[in-house]
Amino acid sequence: MTLPRLLIIGPQGSGKGTQGARVAEAFRIPAISTGDVFRANVKEGTPLGQQVQAIIEAGDLVPDELTGAIVRDRLAQDDAAGGFLLDGYPRNIGQVGDLDAFLEERDEPLTGVIELSVPREESIRRIPLRAAEQGRSDDNDESIAKRLSIYESETAPILDVYRERGVAFEVDGVGTLDEVFERIITALAARGIVA
């Protein structure tokens, strides 16, 4: 059996947070969302949260070094030994190298990269709904457009790296939550990754 060491990638509004949590629950592995870690720290007013708040509110991304340190620390915890699902990291080629180095040291390569494919118009339609449901101040028109552009220019290219390694696969992210989840589980099972 292949251990579920997974990464879920998709533009903002693709549903990757929701689907990532569902996949992690099905496999009984931790879902490690850098965005959730950052938002929790902001809410708690920690030093990290204060550092991150201004960056997020401007629609910018947290620096690679800070994000990488948080992810490495989280992956080193005991509950990630049997697998994990990363959401929001790596988000650029530099972070892929950082994650590769860390996972190679541990002999724990990624076994699946789920690409949730959603048209830009659908992302833009969904994000204001998410903002209303979750009360997210970082989901305004200006920061949405900026983050989608950053995704397209910096994050989407990492998929080429994972496709070359044969671990990335595309899943249609449009449909009901259950339909999209079933597509993901079926695609993982086809790769020997079963819950």
Image (tube, helix red, strand yellow):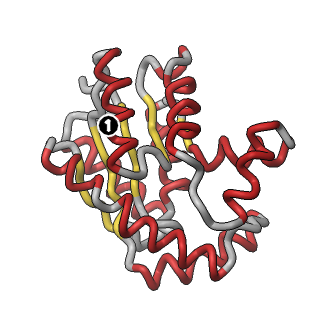
Q: Position of residue 163 (x, y in %)?
A: 18, 50
Q: Which residue is mark 1?
A: 97
Residue at the (19%, 40%) spot, across then down: 191
User: Is residue 153 rendered to the left or right of residue 17?
Assistant: left
Is 160 placed above or below 141 here? above
Residue at the (64%, 82%) spot, across then down: 141
Q: Position of residue 11 (x, y in %)?
A: 45, 66
- Image quadrant where residue 126 sits: bottom right
Image quadrant in which the C terminus is located: top left
Image quadrant in which the N terminus is located: top left
Residue 25 visible in rendering = no
Q: Amino acid at mark 1?
A: Gly
User: Is residue 137 rendered to the left or right of residue 6?
Assistant: right
Residue at the (67%, 71%) spot, across then down: 139
Between 187 and 135, which is closer to the camera in this rendering?
A: 135
Q: Position of residue 9 (x, y in %)?
A: 39, 55
